Image (cartoon, rainbow, N blue to C red):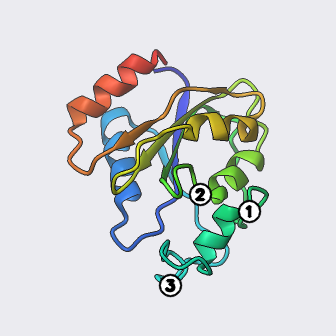
Amino acid sequence: MYGKILIAYFSASPSRRTEQVAHKIVDVIGGDLYEIVPAVPYTEDDLNWNDSKSRSSMEMRDPQSRPAIAGEPLDLAPYQVIFVGFPIWWYVAPHIINTFLESYDLTGKIVVPFATSGGSAMGQTTTHLRPSAEGALMKEGRRFDMGETPMAINSWIAALGI
């Protein structure tokens, strides 16, 4: 690893699975942790993917949807590597991840997506995120299970070549 590292994550469900994986990554490689918090928090009803009128369903049907993020923007200037974590929603990253990436000048930075899911693979998630990370080198992402060991995380990071 080189340069300063940021591990940014969005974790909406009550289980906070993505947050748990983000903490495991920090334990393995260090870096600063940042939670991507929506300006309007998601309720359990908002996250009901079985309801076509739920907030998450409507956002994911609209490719232009960019949910607002709470708080002040980060200063990303000191960071060389940015890990971005999220749950898989409808086989891709939630659109709030596009909001996060599009909010910054990522020129020359390395962006590494990671995800959690109840069963979906990463699929084309990384490909769909690349246009939102203009100027960055986006590495291929990985989906993590809850039982990931520090050794597995370390092996994945070593394979990234960063």
Residue 50 x/y as whole percent: 48, 75
Amino acid beneath label 3: Asp
Q: Amino acid at mark 1?
A: Asp
Q: Are marks 3 and 2 in contact (CB under 8 Å)?
A: no
On the question of residue 74 being in view, the answer is no
CB under 8 Å between discs 1 and 2: no
In-image side of 42 versus 159 (left or right): right
The picture places residue 80, in percent across and down from the top left corner, at 61, 28
Nearer-the-camera pick, 3 or 36: 36
The image quarter containing residue 128 is: top right
Amino acid type indicated by mark 2: Pro
Instruction: Judge left or right: residue 148 versus residue 12.
Output: left
Q: Which mark is residue 45?
A: 3
Residue beneath disc 2:
94
Name the residue carrying label 1.
Answer: 62
4 and 15: which one is in front? 15
The N terminus is located in which quarter?
Answer: top left
Q: Nearer the viewer, residue 5 or 40?
A: 40
Task: Determine the secondary structure under disc 2.
Answer: loop
Q: Earlier in the sequence, mark 3 or mark 2?
A: 3
Q: Tell me the residue at 70%/46% (across/down).
A: 101
